[in-house]
Amino acid sequence: MNLLTISELTAATGLEESLIRFYESEYGEQLPEKILRGNGLFFQPQAVAVLQNLHARHGGGPVRDTSPVEGPAYARVIAVSSGKGGVGKSNLALNLAIEMQRFGQMSLVLDADLGMANIHLLAGIQPRNSLTDLIEAQLPISDLISEGPAGVGIVTGGSGVLALADSTAAQRRQMIAALEVMEKNAQVIIVDTAAGMGAGVRDFLKAADEIILVLTQDLTSLADAYGLLKSLRQEGCTKPVYSVVNMAASLQQAAAVAKRFTDCADRFLHSEVRNIGYIMRDSAVGAATASRTPLNIFAPQSRAGKNIRNIAAALLRRRDKKIRKSSAFQRYMKLVEG
Ligand SMILES: Nc1ncnc2c1ncn2[C@@H]1O[C@H](COP(=O)(O)OP(=O)(O)OP(=O)(O)O)[C@@H](O)[C@H]1O
Ligand SMILES: [Mg+2]
């Protein structure tokens, strides 16, 4: 029997290593057991067909975006928001970036929560200079990006990033220039925003390529998310909006919450919201925070960790070639300047 190394398996299946790892973590029980030889684990040849079947079931196409983009390619900017606070935005934003990075996408998290920047706390790293510091002292962009877990970049917005409206034109240009450098150097930027309805947050959501609204089964969370969506649509925002149901007690509950929200959006706002995943309530989330390690590093096989990996995979399956052709932060500047 010819056992295969991971690179041989990659060649035999035509799948990226990160994708094979993803299928292993999700469907391990369907794959033939790995065999220990010497000091390494090897795949059995039957794994090739199993992986190809799994991949076909997942819609086939390559998950990694290797298609050439003409002209400057900007990152896909995904804003994570919610109507109500404390629903799990920051936890989702950071771990989504980690999983995107594992899927081969250069990812960066921008902490744009003015009140309580806490991505660095969740990531267990020291905060570096914020974007606001950049304006106060002339700093190179490289001084802003911290290397976080799994190699994701982490940037703290400081009080400035979503308060562009209150800054001078020169400060705005400086800030946008810094953000554009990041957009050209990453493939995905996940922006963790504050909850709520502030105009700064809404302008930012309108400029992003895609918006994730985090919901919980709590009625105020749903009502506030609905209010936010309604304002966005009334202000002419047509960007794709995805919902994610967090802290679900069961799959049935998650599905019911998602349906309630997407049905309301459809009926009352004629607005399509696609539910892109759910995250179970899981004590591993709190344990990860307590150990200052992101969930998907601390316990990648936890239920919530796997749920977030599935959301990353679902987002990567939905990619739109148009998205990376223009700068979200330039659009934001235009919105702010009216
Ligand atoms: N799936 C989950 N299971 C259990 N606890 C969770 C889950 N998701 C988040 N939490 C917990 O909920 C709390 C809020 O999470 P987080 O800080 O990510 O929310 P947030 O929406 O960013 O909050 P804020 O609006 O204050 O910025 C944290 O204590 C976190 O550990
Ligand atoms: Mg937060």
Image (cartoon, rainbow, N blue to C red):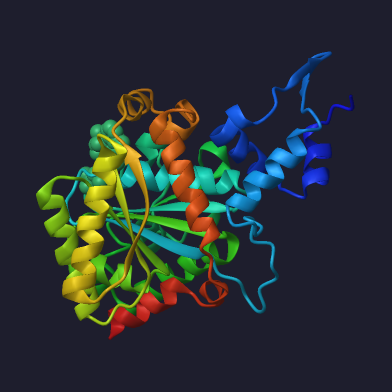
Q: Where does residue 281 sit, x and y in percent of width and height? A: 28, 33
Q: Where does residue 87 sit, x and y in percent of width and height? A: 23, 44
Q: Quadrant of residue 40?
A: top right
**Residue 72, relative to residue 161: is it above or below?**
below
Nearest the camera: 278 or 111? 278
Nearest the camera: 287 or 20? 20
**Residue 37, relative to residue 7: is it above or below?**
above
Nearest the camera: 220 or 137? 220
> How many callouts does the rendering have?
0
Q: Is residue 300 something that shows in the picture?
A: yes
Identify the residue at horizontal 51%, vertical 73% (top origin).
Answer: 323
Q: Viewed as shown, does residue 164 lie left or right of 64?
A: left
Identify the residue at horizontal 36%, vertical 77% (top origin).
Answer: 333
Rendered-image quadrant of the N terminus: top right
Q: Viewed as shown, does residue 157 lie left or right of 228?
A: right
Q: Viewed as shown, does residue 334 lie left or right of 316?
A: left
Identify the residue at horizontal 78%, vertical 43% (top origin).
Answer: 10
Q: Where does residue 332 sit, x and y in percent of width and height? A: 36, 75
Rendered-image quadrant of the C terminus: bottom left
Residue that sits furthest to the top in the current view:
38
**Residue 148, relative to residue 161: is it above or below?**
above
Q: Is residue 124 something that shows in the picture?
A: no
Identify the residue at horizontal 58%, vertical 52% (top origin).
Answer: 58
Q: Ligand 1 is found in which quarter of the picture?
A: top left
Q: Quadrant of residue 35?
A: top right
Nearest the camera: 78 or 312? 312
